[in-house]
Amino acid sequence: MSQMPQQAALPKCPSCAEPVESGDLFCGACGYDLSVVPAPPQDHPTLTMTGSPGDGVDWPAPEPESSGSPPAVHLPADLPGTDSGGTPLPEHRTGTDPHEHRTGTDPHGHEAGTQGAPQPAGAGVRFDRPAEPDEYPLQAPDPRLAENTAAEESAQVCVACRSGRVDSDGYCENCGHAQPRERDRVERESGPVAAVSDRGLRHHRNEDAFAVGHTALPDGTPATVAIVCDGVSSATRPDDASAAASQAAGDTLLTALPRGTHPQTAMHEAIVAAAQAVNALAEEPATAREHAPHQNAPACTIVGAVVASGLLVVGWVGDSRVYWVPDDRSAPPARLTEDDSWAAQMVAAGLMSEAEAYADERAHAITGWLGADAYELEPHTASFKPDRSGVVVVCTDGLWNYAETAEEMSEVVPADAAARPLHSARVLVGHALDGGGHDNVTVAVVPFPAPSQGAGSA
């Protein structure tokens, strides 16, 4: 019985380099046919470049020297070859580009493939196998993935757990913590006047709003403006009401004062404009009222102060307040407004003392406010001429609940409030938060007299 010619044992597979044992006909790792591996070639001496080519090989003829073109580059794959059985290798060339047959890297530094490129005999690659198509072709990249990645990078991170992303509803997707809203903490300064508004520690949103600004009278005298509004929580959209009222009042004052309108008259006009802005919020279709018949119209309180030409003008509707605190703390401070509230009415009627009235649970029930369902509007205005420097504190009950009397307010106002109004407003808000922060807290600090810093408004 004839036998297959035996070859010397190979230490490893020529195709995958896995170790093989003596007598194996196929590689156990890749299935390579070990029987077709040619015997190791005999060592040949190195031929000099001027030596004659080996016998039996037809080298391409050299280019004529007179052509002037550089000699053509010849690659090993340009030569005809045979496999171990003497069968000619199939032609795989598809063009004349010499890079088409190279492995390793292409001219641009990218790794090149070997499929379809002829290899020299004995290199451990089978050339008699047809080219196999890719079973899992790569898909084009989805442009939406890049957009999602950019969105993830720009997503807000939770302030509580510092890892979860915040969804469109304002809650953390990881821990569920509600994120601070834009109005939860607002700080602003305009020239010499500054204000701070904080949501507090108990309310789910900030229903306060303010407007501060500075401008100049026709004669160039500086004027500063501060408006503070407190939304009525029992009404619909109290946050919208306070925002609309403060914006309208602030704009009216900063427009009227440069025209020469008397500050007290301008304050009256500003409160009327604020009331109209809040009333406009109640203009809704009749069907909306049918679906929510028990909802009240949007409502808020308002208090403001103007410092100009040695005058201190205040105006208000509701229970937000204005305090006067002189720089010389030996001089008496003063409260410049009277609340539109049940407690104030009891005290004015002589039915209760101030301490008794404000200890009652009905103390903060307001009797005057801005809104479509308010009583006939009668803005309160007053004008003062302080004989010394100091600061004007304009605030909601979220602050004065923790410093009710003028003396108590004077104690918590920093001594350098006139020079550092924003810092002082932060201190006052912090005092309310330290006291419990049961309500929204908003305070504006206005130095008196108004220092000259040029005309303008903010």
Image (tube, grey):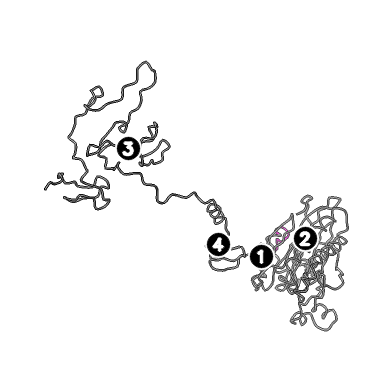
> Is 382 on the left or on the right of 187, as rendered?
right
Image position of 87 (left or right of 188): left
| Marks 3 and 1, the one that precedes in the sequence | 3
The residue carrying mark 2 is 247
Q: Amino acid at mark 2?
A: Gln
Q: Disc 4 or disc 3, which is closer to the eye?
A: 3
Q: Position of residue 163 (x, y in %)?
A: 52, 62
C-alpha separation, residue under disc 4 versus residue under disc 3: 55 Å
The secondary element bearing badge 4 is classed as loop
Q: Earlier in the sequence, mark 1 or mark 2?
A: 1
N-term-proximal mark, 4 vs 3: 3
Q: Which residue is mark 4?
A: 165
Indicate which disc residue 184 carries: 1
Q: Which mark is nearer the camera, 3 or 1? A: 3
Mark earlier in primary sequence (2, 3): 3
Few, some or many C-alpha atoms within 10 Å of disc 3 (few <14, some 14-19, many ≥20)?
many
Query: In which image quadrant can residue 237 be found?
Result: bottom right
Specify the amino acid type for callout 3: Pro
Q: In the orientation shown, which residue stands out farthest toward the left? A: 1
Q: Is residue 310 above or below residue 438?
A: above
- Name the quadrant containing residue 282: bottom right
- In percent of width and height, residue 32 lies at 25, 48
Q: Could you tell me which residue is drawn at 80 percent across and 79 percent down?
A: 342
Q: Nearer the viewer, mark 2 or mark 4?
A: 4
Q: Which residue is mark 3?
A: 118
